């Protein structure tokens, strides 16, 4: 399938699609990941992965764009939701140079930023090692993506 939107849906009880992300989930608040739930899972799904990316952030390095806030993978196919602040599953490295979730924290006065929370359905249990960067992760999972979709939240300081 590659990277194309599918019928799978991602939602949060904390904010609506294109809605404002509550401060609690930002770097100015408790800095915990929001609750997430996904439905319409593609047949043949063996595992999931989640990521959060801010494409409105300034360029950072090596020709990449935006800012990676979260990368979580090796999520079993039996899992269809994460509770607020979930620390389960394998964590990749975000652009704060930490593993796990780092909430919205755009530069003051930089305007509204859009935070794309993505869920990927994979046709394999890849058992990837902890600490992958987004680009290392995407290289390994691209051939295995059978469904994906996003939830977009906004935040401004």
Image (spheres, rainbow, N blue to C red):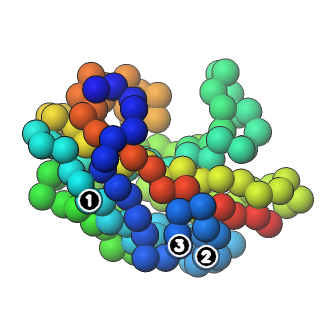
User: Residue at 32% across / 65% down in the picture?
Assistant: 37
- First reached walking from the N terminus: tag 1 or tag 2: 2
Q: Nearer the viewer, residue 142 or 39?
A: 39
Up the image or down, 111 lies above or below 93; here it is: below
What element does badge 2 sit on? loop
Query: Considering only vertical position in the picture, is 69 above or below 153?
Result: above
Of marks 1 and 2, the one in the foreground: 1
Q: Position of residue 112 (x, y in %)?
A: 77, 57
Q: Which mark is residue 76?
A: none
Q: Residue at x 65, y 61 (%)?
A: 154
Query: What residue would you read off at disc 1?
Result: 39
- Report, in whole angstroms, how far the alpha carbon at label 1 lies from the one at label 3: 17 Å
Residue 15 is tagged as 3
Q: Earlier in the sequence, mark 1 or mark 3?
A: 3
What residue is shown with label 2? 22
Q: Position of residue 148 (x, y in %)?
A: 35, 42
Q: Are marks 2 and 3 in contact (CB under 8 Å)?
A: yes
How far is disc 2 from disc 3 in space, using C-alphas?
7 Å
Disc 1 secondary structure class: strand
- Inspect this view and state whether residue 88 appears: no
């Amino acid at each position: 399938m590659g990277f194309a939107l599918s019928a799978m849906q991602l939602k949060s009880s904390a904010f609506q699609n294109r809605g404002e992300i509550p401060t609690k989930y930002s770097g100015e608040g408790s800095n915990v990941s929001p609750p997430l739930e996904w439905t319409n899972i593609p047949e043949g799904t063996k595992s999931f992965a989640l990521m959060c990316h801010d494409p409105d952030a300034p360029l950072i390095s090596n020709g990449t764009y935006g800012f990676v806030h979260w990368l979580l993978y090796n999520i079993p196919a039996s899992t269809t939701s994460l509770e607020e602040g979930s620390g389960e599953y394998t964590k990749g490295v975000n652009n704060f140079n930490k593993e796990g979730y780092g909430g919205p924290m755009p530069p003051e006065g930089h305007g509204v930023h859009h935070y794309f929370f993505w869920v990927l359905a994979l046709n394999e249990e890849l058992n990837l090692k902890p600490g992958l960067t987004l680009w290392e992760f995407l290289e390994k999972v691209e051939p295995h993506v059978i469904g994906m979709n996003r939830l977009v939240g906004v935040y401004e300081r």
